[in-house]
Each structure stands twice: as structure tokens, then as C-alpha cells.
Image: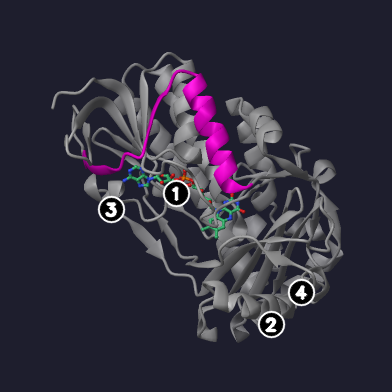
Amino acid sequence: MAAQSYDIVTVGGGVAAAAFAKAMAERGAKVLILERERRFKDRVRGEGLVCWGVAEARQLGIHDLLKQGCGHELPLVESGAGQRDLTLTTPHRLPVLSFPHQHMQEVLLAAAENSGVEVRRGVSVELVEPGPAPAVLVDGRSHERIPTRLVVAADGRGSPARKWADFAVSEQSNGYYMAGVLLSDIQASPDTLYYVFNPDLGMCIGLIPLGKNRSRAYFMYPKSTGYRLQGENMLDLFLTESPKAYSPLADYYSGAKCIGPLASFDVSDVWVEHPYRNGVALIGDAAATTDPTFGQGLSLALRDARILSTELANDSDWDRAANRYAEQHRRYFHACHTVEGWSRTLFQDPSPEAAALREKAMPLIAQDPSRVPDHIFSGPDLPLNDEVRARFFGER
Ligand SMILES: Cc1cc2nc3c(=O)[nH]c(=O)nc-3n(C[C@H](O)[C@H](O)[C@H](O)COP(=O)(O)OP(=O)(O)OC[C@H]3O[C@@H](n4cnc5c(N)ncnc54)[C@H](O)[C@@H]3O)c2cc1C
């Protein structure tokens, strides 16, 4: 069946695709979003947009939409060693913005549609054909083939589109699981993000208030524990194990009610070094799935949306523009990846080798907390070099 042609077709309609499509439609491009879900539901996904991601949202012109449509601001972070006010201590002077992920998706998709993007829901992409005249094939009886100038694959973790388009994928296995569940009636501060590591146990907890008496509770733990916290019958174990990492949780969770599924994930990193080739660009998790323990995925997705849309708007040669996006992606992704690796070693890794590194580094960090590279909250544009590493590990 012959189909209409578009400047851009996106595979998926999550945060990366919706933010990018909106930006391109506002610049006059004819954009089609293909999203397989008719209605988004709780999949246990990112709900804390860190400060540098909030700055990205502002630059994309979606910050007010998110804040008013579904957002809740968290100016404070509790790390177990005291509170930090992000609005005073980050370069952007911004809080974390939290939201229920599925509501955020609806808000952004509606905003894309209002900007002129055509959105088709309940449509699953079955194949991407790369090349100088790329196309997307969708399911259904019609076996529709949709030609386009550029395919933007934003189909999330495990992205089949990156395989269809023949991208080489790199992977780093990390030895932890991350479990998450939505709770109500938590007895904790509603404007504080709780983010506490316990390296002796190899554990970390995250507690993200979402407003309206809802909080997303996370628990990261070593795969060597032998259990997988998934499904209703593992909830009690989730609620008793996570306070081992941070004891105040026992009180916070005492009257809690479970209001969503309990799911857990392997936190391994999966990425493509150069996320553009042959008429197909990858953005969001399809380009790089980072360890969610460090909460960088949403911010990276918005950075991808901003950089790719800016490059395409500034160059009529889209092959050249998309290659420039991919070069920039490599730099900012690797900055996040590197700092996450250092932080995992110093704050989470229970091995004797990591404990020895902590013995040297932690007293110096206690004296001067600025030794900790702040890329997680302040973004990948902060300096990153041997000097930064040496200060963090107490070698200088
Ligand atoms: C447990 C967990 C906690 C996290 N916590 C945080 C956090 O606190 N902060 C943070 O910044 N990040 C966090 N992240 C990461 C964050 O959720 C992701 O980086 C972000 O959702 C990526 O957005 P995306 O648009 O690339 O992909 P997705 O959000 O996965 O969207 C992909 C979309 O594509 C659609 N799709 C897929 N395949 C097809 C197809 N064939 N055809 C049509 N549609 C398709 C899907 O239905 C989906 O809507 C977390 C991740 C996990 C797993």
C-alpha cells in the first residue's frame, strides 16, 4: 500500500521521541510518531528528572508543560550524610522535577500533537529499512510501508530498531538489580529526594516523592543475593530488605500502601558509539541505556532531542547533521558513563578492592565534598579529566 511521505518518522512515542518531534514540528518539519501503546501505564520507569535535565527541558520549551501538567519539584536531596539544597548548589540553580512517567508521556505526546506532529497510537513498527531513502514498516493487515527522509528510532531499552538498522551495540554488565514500586502514605518529606548508598552491602535506595501522596521507591542490590524482586508476592521482601541500606526507611514505609506493580531490572549499560547511520538516528534509551541507579536516562533523552533537532534545523544536509549529533552524543554519553563507573566503585561496590579505595578517598571527601564530581546532578558538561578522577579517589 502506498503511503504518505514524511520528513521524519519516529519509532516510539516516549519522552525522547515526543520531545524531539515537537521541536522539529515547531521548525516546520512534517513528523509522524508511531507509538504501539494506546494508553500508557505504569512500567516502572524514570520519574526523577535531575537538575541538568530540567535545564534541557527549559531549552526545549517543555519545562512549564511538565511542571504544570504532572510535575512535582524536589529542591532537596538526602544522601544519608546530610541534606543538600540543589537550588543553591548546582550551576543551574534548579530542583529535581519528578512526575509519574506515564503522565509525563501523555503530556509530551499531547504537546507534540498540538505542535503539528501526527501521532498514531496502537501502531507497532515491525521493521526499519535504512538507506538513502529509508522507510518504516508497520504491523496490521495493510502491511503499510511509510517512506521518510529520516527515521528516528526512540523505541527504548532493548530497541529492536537498532538491530534492524544494523548498529553495533556495546554492553557493560553491572552486577546489580534495580527494583521499583509505587507507594502511597510514606512518612517522609514530600520535597526531598532520598538517594543513599550503602557500600558495605552493595546497596542503594532511592525514594522519589511524586506529589499527591505518591512516591516511587527504588532498591538497588547485588545480583549475588540470588533473589529477584518482582511481582506482588515479593513486596514484603522489598519492604524489609531496602531499610537494610538506609534504616529510616523502616519508619517511612510503616504505613505505606502499594499502588503499582513491583518490577526489577538488570542495570547493565547498553549503548551505540555513533548513533546515526544510513538514514536512521537513535535517541534516548535506544542510543544509550545507562544504569538507572544514577538517574541520567531522562536527561540524556532530552539532550538527544535538543541536539538532534538543533543540528537538523541548522543544516539542509541531514546526513551530515545527524552525524554531528552522533559525535556529540558520544562525548556526553561517555561523560555520564565514566562518572557513573567511578561512583559505582566508590559508593556501591562491596568488594575488598573498592573498600580499600574508599578508605583513602572517603575521609578526604568528608573534609571537602567538592571532590565528588557532580555530573549526576549538574550534567556532562562539567570538566572531566585525570585531575577530577584523582581528586575523587583521594590520589591528590
Ligand atoms: C527502573 C528504572 C528507573 C529509572 N529511573 C530514572 C530516573 O529516576 N531518572 C532518569 O532520568 N531516568 C530513569 N530511568 C531511565 C528512563 O526511564 C529512560 O531513560 C527513559 O524512559 C528513556 O526514554 P525513551 O523515550 O528513550 O524510551 P521509553 O520511555 O522506553 O519509550 C519508548 C517508547 O517506544 C514505544 N515502542 C517501543 N517499540 C515500539 C515499536 N516497535 N513500535 C512502536 N512503538 C514502540 C514504547 O511503547 C514506548 O512508549 C529509569 C529506568 C528504569 C528502568
Q: Residue at label 1?
A: 285
- Callouts 3 and 4 close, C-beta under 8 Å: no
**Residue 195, placed above or below residue 296:** below
Q: Secondary structure at mark 1?
A: helix
Q: Residue at x 44, y 22 (%)?
A: 24
Per the rendering, the mark at residue 246 is 4
Q: Hey, what amino acid is under mark 1?
A: Asp
Q: Which mark is residue 168?
A: 3
Q: Is residue 108 magenta?
A: yes
Give, as a single range, the part of the protein colored magenta.
100-128
Q: Residues within 10 Å of mark 4 (few under 14, many from 20)?
A: many
Within 10 angstroms of label 3, few (less than 14), some, or many (20 or more) residues?
A: few
Q: Earlier in the sequence, mark 2 or mark 1?
A: 2
Measured as percent of width and height from the top left, residue 262 is found at 56, 67
Image x and y of residue 229, in percent: 54, 75
Q: Residue 173 at x, y = what percent?
A: 43, 69
Name which residue lies at 46% across and 15% down. 27
Viewer-closest of 23 and 253: 253
For the residue marked with disc 4, what is the amino acid? Answer: Tyr
Mark 3 residue's CB less than 8 Å from ligand 1 = no
**Residue nearer the viewer, 343 or 129:** 129
Q: Residue at 23% across / 47% down in the picture?
A: 164
Answer whether labels 3 and 1 touch (C-beta < 8 Å): no
Q: Disc 2 designates what residue?
A: 200
**Rounded to the nearest whole Å, what is the CA distance between mark 3 and mark 2?**
36 Å
Q: Separation of disc 2 and disc 4 at Cα?
A: 12 Å
Callout 1: CB less than 8 Å from ligand 1 = yes
Image location (x, y in percent) of residue 37:
41, 44
Mark 3 is on which residue type?
A: Ala
